[in-house]
Image (spheres, grey):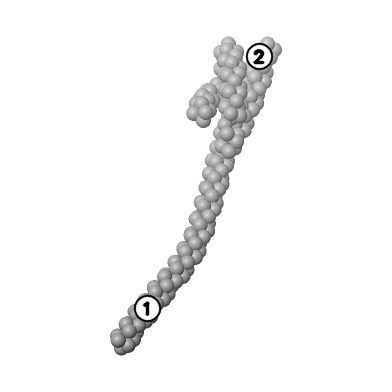
Amino acid sequence: MSSDFEGYEQDFAVLSAEITSKISRVPRLPPDEKKQMVANVEKQLEEARELLEQMDLEVREIPPQSRGMYSNRMRSYKQEMGKLETDFKRSRIAYSDEVRNELLGDDGNSSENQRAHLLDNTERLERSSRRLEAGYQIAVETEQIGQEMLENLSHDREKIQRARERLRETDANLGKSSRVLTGMLRRIIQNRILLVILGIIVVITILTAITLFIRRH
């Protein structure tokens, strides 16, 4: 399941990079090439949306205990998709303005330079934003790993405590068994002593009887 998701991730990363590159090139292309480039970007944006839908379906099938990390990554990809669409809209607006200026006979060189400058600044901001999002994603994943480690440590601690309780119970049972065995040994020794005493008494009694019998005769 996660391997399919990662495959979609790689496809989305490649596709988004291509879209970003093409959007940045739109304002600098001749009119005919711009029209073709805009149509190409629209097609790739649709492919990117379909990839996000597939990724979303994959995330829904992931077990709940592992879904959090993938959900955060999906939010990041959806934000990136929204920015791509916004940049494309800006590029299309600039393209529409150029077409209008051409129809009106206005060269619009100064406005073109301003738009190019604005697009360059926008690209820089987008790159910085993506870096920040990547850092935030890493921080979120690190936090999730830390939480999982804490949960594992908590489970291990519970296991150790249960093992200690079992050892205590075992020691208590061994103590009881030792006391019982000691009592049994004492009784056995006492019984043997009694048997010896009884044997001595019987022997003395027999010898006394024999002695008396001999003296009478």
In this view, the mark in front (1 or 2): 1
Q: Nearer the viewer, residue 173 or 92?
A: 173
Pinpoint residue 99: horizontal percent, then vertical percent: 66, 14
The earlier-in-sequence mark between 1 and 2 is 2
Q: Quadrant of residue 178?
A: bottom left
Question: Image point 46% across, 70% down: which residue?
Answer: 183
Q: Quadrant of residue 85?
A: top right
Question: Image point 57% across, 31% down: which residue?
Answer: 62
Crowding around mark 2 (Cα neighbors within 10 Å: few <14, some 14 to 19, many 20+) is some
Pinpoint residue 90: horizontal percent, then vertical percent: 65, 24
Classify 139 as above or below 183: above
Classify 189 as above or below 61: below
Element carrying mark 1: helix
Query: Looking at the figure, which quarter contains the C terminus?
Result: bottom left
Residue placed furthest toward the bottom = 215
Question: Image point 63% across, 31% down: which residue?
Answer: 79
Q: Amino acid at mark 2?
A: Val
Residue 72 visible (yes or no): no
Q: Nearer the viewer, residue 190 or 201?
A: 201
Q: Which residue is mark 2?
A: 99
Residue 15 visible (yes or no): yes
Pinpoint residue 157: horizontal percent, then vertical percent: 52, 54
Q: Which residue is mark 1?
A: 202
Q: Are marks 1 and 2 in contact (CB under 8 Å)?
A: no
Q: Quadrant of residue 92?
A: top right
Q: Nearer the viewer, residue 183 or 54?
A: 183
Q: Amino acid at mark 1?
A: Val
Crowding around mark 1 (Cα neighbors within 10 Å: few <14, some 14 to 19, many 20+) is few
